[in-house]
Image: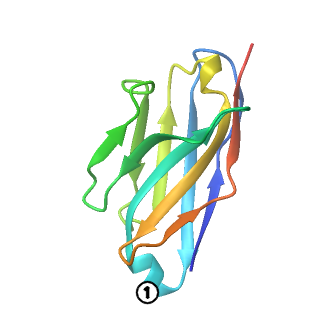
Amino acid sequence: QVQLVESGGGLVQPGGSLRLSCAASGSIFSINNINNMGWYRQAPGKQRELVATITSAFGTNYADSVKGRFTISRGNAKNTVYLQMNSLKPEDTAVYYCNAVATYGVGYWGNGTLVTVSS
């Protein structure tokens, strides 16, 4: 089992920045077998969507809507993942969820952190 805890959400004005963090904890076996990690978001009344992912080899993938504004990164210990969000827009308002996928095929989700972009 892997537990994911997100932090860093909050209220920010349009054009501002936020940095989300996610830390994974659990058994040594589970932590050592985390492969891809990523961020997803769900806006009110909408389906959850991919924001960005990063592999254990630090390869990255971004949704078109956030390319050039958001940067995903991973700690050297590979059990933490970050999302630097710049030039935030009101349409970025959503609950942001951390995701981790283990090499044995199981995916884990955090409880989410709310990001609100509003003046």
Identify the image quadrant of the C terminus. Answer: top right
Give the percent coordinates (x, y) of residue 86: 50, 25
Figure colour scheme: rainbow
Residue beneath disc 1: 29
> What's under tag 1, amino acid-wise?
Phe
Left/right of residue 48 with respect to residue 34 in the rendered view:
right
- In percent of width and height, residue 89 lies at 59, 18
Q: Against 64, is 25 above or below?
A: below
Visible in this render: residue 49? yes
Number of labelled discs? Answer: 1
Say which quadrant the N terminus sits in.
Answer: bottom right
Vertical order, 25 against 82 (above or below): below
Q: Is residue 61 above or below residue 55?
A: above
Front in this rendered view, residue 105 or 78 = 105
Q: 78 and 89: which one is in front? A: 89
Percent across and percent down for residue 22 are 56, 56
Determine the secondary structure under disc 1: helix
Residue 65 % position (x, y): 45, 24
Q: Quadrant of residue 16?
A: top right
Residue at image x 48%, y 37%? 84
81 on left or right of 112:
left
Evaluate whether residue 79 shows in this view: no
Residue, x 52% and y 57% (percent of image)?
Answer: 99
Disc 1 crowd, CA 10 A, few/some/many (<14, 14-19, 20+)? few
Question: Looking at the image, which is closer to me, 114 or 17?
Answer: 114
Residue at 45% x, 51% y is 38
Q: Quadrant of residue 70?
A: top left
Q: Quadrant of residue 61?
A: top left
